[in-house]
Image (spheres, rainbow, N blue to C red):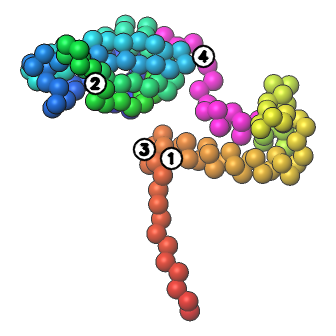
Amino acid sequence: MPDTVRLGDTLDVLFSLDEFPANDGWVATVFWIGILTDFSKLTTADGVNHLLELTPTETDANLNVEQMRWNIQVVKGADKFTPDFGTQDGLVNFSTADAQDLRSSNQITLDAIIARIENRATVDQNEYTIKDRQIKKMTIEELLKFQAIYEARVAKDKRREKGQGNQLSKVRFQRP
């Protein structure tokens, strides 16, 4: 299953479940669940494999722009198993989307903190809450602390978007 699905795109996934071959009578269904998502789709047999086919209309109407959990369940008679599961991010369908703020929640929070530090925060930004405290009630020290935290989070988000993930660096210390 891909990590992301663009709403309004076709989604075809071939599941190879060696212990549960389709040609042996196993029937597979994929389920998605999230804050705004509750959807399932029966796969079709493709030899020993199970083929999931979602049309553009199905992805657009039944999945959402959010992180969803999915699992595949197989059934044969009274037996039922969940051989695979994971998470999937729904991406915006640009052909039907309205104008919207596509910043991450970390970026929105960082922007509000910086605006408050620079004394140009909007009413909404001043009302923003971090750890049960409104930004407008935070001291400059607290704002600077949270600025550093959210700058690191935004940098991590940007690395993940570029497919870099968490990068480890090896460092070797030697005494002179």
Name the secondary structure under disc 1.
Answer: helix
Q: What's the amino acid at mark 1?
A: Arg
Name the secondary structure under disc 4.
Answer: loop
Neighbor class of circle 2 (other Cα within 10 Å; few <14, some 14-19, many 20+) is few
- For the point 32% across and 12% down, which residue is it? 41
Q: Residue 89 placed where, x, y %?
A: 45, 27
- For the point 77% across and 37% down, which residue is it? 130
Q: Which mark is residue 81?
A: 2
Q: CA distance from mark 1 to mark 2?
A: 36 Å
Neighbor class of circle 4 (other Cα within 10 Å; few <14, some 14-19, many 20+) is few
Disc 2 + disc 3, Cβ < 8 Å: no
Residue holding disc 3: 163
Q: Which mark is residue 99?
A: 4
Q: Nearer the viewer, mark 4 or mark 2?
A: 2
Which circle's residue, 1 or 2, is located before the other in the chain? Answer: 2
The answer to whether 12 appears left or right of 58 in the picture is left
- Foreground residue, 88 or 7? 88
Neighbor class of circle 1 (other Cα within 10 Å; few <14, some 14-19, many 20+) is some
Name the secondary structure under disc 3.
Answer: loop
Measured along the vertical axis of the image, is residue 38 above or below residue 15? above
Q: What's the amino acid at mark 3?
A: Gly
Q: CA distance from mark 1 to mark 4?
A: 25 Å
Q: Nearer the viewer, mark 1 or mark 4?
A: 1
Q: What's the amino acid at mark 4?
A: Ala
Decide whether residue 67 is among the magenta residues. Answer: no
Q: CA distance from mark 3 to mark 1?
A: 6 Å
For the record, the magenta segment spans 91-112
Residue holding disc 1: 159
